[in-house]
Image (cartoon, rainbow, N blue to C red):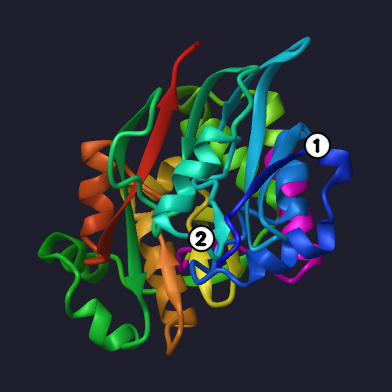
Amino acid sequence: MSKKPLVHFVKHRNIDRARWDATVASDDARLPYGFTWWLDVVTNERWDGLVLDDYRAVMPLPYTRKIGPLSQVSSPAFTQQCGPWGDSTDTELALFLSSIPKTAIKVAIPLREASRIMGPVPGFTARERTNFVLDMAPGHASLSRKFSKSLRRNLRRHPGGVMVPVTVEEVISVYAASAGEKAGLSKKHYEIMRNLARACSAREMSIITGFEDDDGQLLACGFFPHYRGRFINSFGSSTDLGYDRVGMSRLLDGLIKNQAGPGKLLDFEGSDLPGVAEYFNSFRPRRTAYQQLVRSAW
């Protein structure tokens, strides 16, 4: 007789970090969001976990608010998906969700792309979210021929330029000046980004790069964490001049040119915003959907 699967709630301090990280590393998604060090940075160590059986699969519970025994569980900054990571079935996903403590008075958690609730789960509603992923295996020459007409035209109108190394402080400065207020980011978010970039760089899991025009003017820059060949468009923006000279398009095109090859993916990390989705789609990636699950107060 097969053993009935069990999901255990484990406090942050009691998680076996080596085994948790090994489970995340085994996941086919090739995403870094579930590693203990990533979660520690983006939540300031405010997360607990759900563990299936003997670390066969794991799911973090990041806390965005915690008042006494009550908490609010939702995805932290710069973390698009929250698992479960490892080896689990759709039936076991329902078991994960039912194991979230009742003290979590509100839950809004995004699943990994491969995990989907197939039927109603008591208390939860599901919303489809959009992501775009470009398979870079064919190489830049083949991929660029499939770019949208408007993107190809813009790249032809603005030839030249070069990819350059930049610091995370430059990336933050450009973002704060151009998009930070609109995105609602605070000093806390920039500090998380600063620490996350350092943590990824220490593990050789990031590219922090910019794009300069032929006159040496910086047009765009970004932070791209990567894991097992999957590069994530996590945090990037154009300068004022870059908006006029399609800096972000030239930066992403340059990244594809430098990184394309077998087993390589460019993850655009969104978006549900029509204008942003249309722009990402101009690179002709594959649209991938993931579910955002919400449970209101009991």
Tags 1 and 2 in contact by the CB under 8 Å rule?
A: no
Which contiguous range is marked in magenta?
191-214
Q: Position of residue 256 (x, y in %)?
A: 41, 75
Q: Position of residue 131 (x, y in %)?
A: 34, 52
Residue at 20% over, 62% down: 151
Q: In the rendered image, which residue does mark 1 sit on?
A: 11
Residue 111 showing in the rendered view = no
- Residue at the left extreme of this rendering: 149
Looking at the picture, tell me which residue is in the foreground, 60 or 155.
60
Q: Secondary structure at mark 2?
A: loop
Q: Residues within 10 Å of mark 1 (few under 14, many from 20)?
A: few
Kind of residue at disc 2: Ser
Dot 1 lies on which element?
Answer: loop
Does residue 212 lie above or below 58 as drawn? below
Q: Quadrant of residue 78?
A: top right
Callout 2: 10 Å neighbours few (<14), some, many (20+)? some
Q: Let me know if residue 201 is in the magenta part.
A: yes
In the rendered view, tell whether residue 193 sits above or below residue 204.
above
Residue drawn at x 43%, y 40% as measured from the top left: 240
Name the amino acid type tagged 1.
Answer: Lys
Q: Residue furthest right?
A: 13
Residue beneath the point at 40% across and 54% down: 90
Q: Residue at x 36, y 50 (%)?
A: 116
Q: What is the quadrant of the N terminus in the image?
A: bottom right
Judging depth in this view, the residue of 26 and 75 nearest the camera is 26
User: Could you tell which of marks 1 and 2 lies nearer the N-terminus?
Assistant: 1
Task: Determine which residue is flagged by label 2.
Answer: 88
Q: Position of residue 144 (x, y in %)?
A: 25, 78
Q: Is residue 179 magenta?
A: no
Tag count: 2
Q: CA distance from mark 1 to mark 2?
A: 21 Å
Q: Say which mark, if any, is on residue 19.
A: none
